[in-house]
Image (cartoon, grey):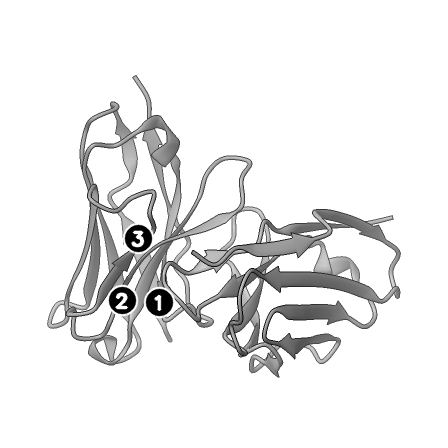
Amino acid sequence: DIQMTQSPSSLSASVGDRVTITCQASQDIRDYLNWYQHKPGKAPKLLIYDASNLETGVPSRFSGSGSGTDFTFTISSLQPEDIATYYCLQYANYPYTFGQGTKLEIK
Amino acid sequence: EVQLVESGGGLVKPGGSLRLSCAASGFTFSSYSMNWVRQAPGKGLEWVSFIDNTGYSIHYADSVRGRFTISRHNTKNLLYLQMNSLRVEDTAVYYCARALDSYWGQGTLVTVSS
């Protein structure tokens, strides 16, 4: 099984800050990686697909990059509504696997 | 409007069974693969199972293989998850998700407890 190591597990930042989350795959997953935002009591929301493509309707302050085993998710200017837990997901091989999640808080 | 609505969750004893359903509308259900994803209390997201649009290609997480069965009824626009031999650690909110894209249900809570 492919392991996804996501870091950090939690992050506190100020409004307007640039925020970066990383995911490392235990083997090459090419660009078969999505990023999701999950707020309590809500369905997860797809933000980035295929590692770097912005889902329709998602603000441009969200971006993703990487290929192979190392991936980065960035919020260019943190907004209060971005408070959530963020997950990466690899879908290169079954079983699909999520990263452990990054809980983002506002300072 | 795309909608996915899960049902069938509830309280069940360890060793018991439950069948979850996911009613799909607003898109051509038979054209999309579907997934089940769960979140245990205080834990992260865990992918559970995949079924392709025809129902012939199916995959499971190691944690549920042999106990859970995913299926679909394309003419009724329904996705199912039959859960047998339930364990306390299966307690979670279960989401159905279309192809792991933008469309997910709101989830149904399964509680396994004596």
Q: Residue furthest front?
A: A27
Looking at the rendered structure, the kind of residue marked 1 is: Gln
Give me the C-alpha separation between circle 1 and circle 2. Answer: 6 Å
The answer to whether the residues at label 1 and label 2 have Cβ atoms under 8 Å apart is yes
Q: Position of residue B23 (x, y in %)?
A: 24, 61
Q: Residue at x 20, y 26 (%)?
A: B15
Residue tagged by mark 1? B3
The answer to whether the residues at label 1 and label 3 have Cβ atoms under 8 Å apart is no
- Quarter occupied by residue B112: top left
**Counting other residues with Cα less than 10 Å from the Cα at mark 1, is it few (<14), some (14-19), or many (20 or more)?**
some
Q: Quadrant of the N terminus of chain B?
A: bottom left
Vertical relation: A105 (above or below) B33: above
Q: Position of residue B54 (x, y in %)?
A: 16, 75
The answer to whether the residues at label 3 and label 2 have Cβ atoms under 8 Å apart is no
Residue tagged by mark 3? B6
**Of residues A3 and A55, the one drawn nearer to the viewer in this rendering:** A3
**Of residues A76 and B107, the one drawn nearer to the viewer in this rendering:** A76
Q: Is residue A13 left or right of residue A4?
A: right
Labels 3 and 2 share a subunit: yes
**Of residues A6 and A37, the one drawn nearer to the viewer in this rendering:** A6
Q: Residue at x 24, y 75 (%)?
A: B29
**Of residues B24 and B112, the one drawn nearer to the viewer in this rendering:** B112
Label 1 SS: strand
**Counting other residues with Cα less than 10 Å from the Cα at mark 3, is it few (<14), some (14-19), or many (20 or more)?**
many
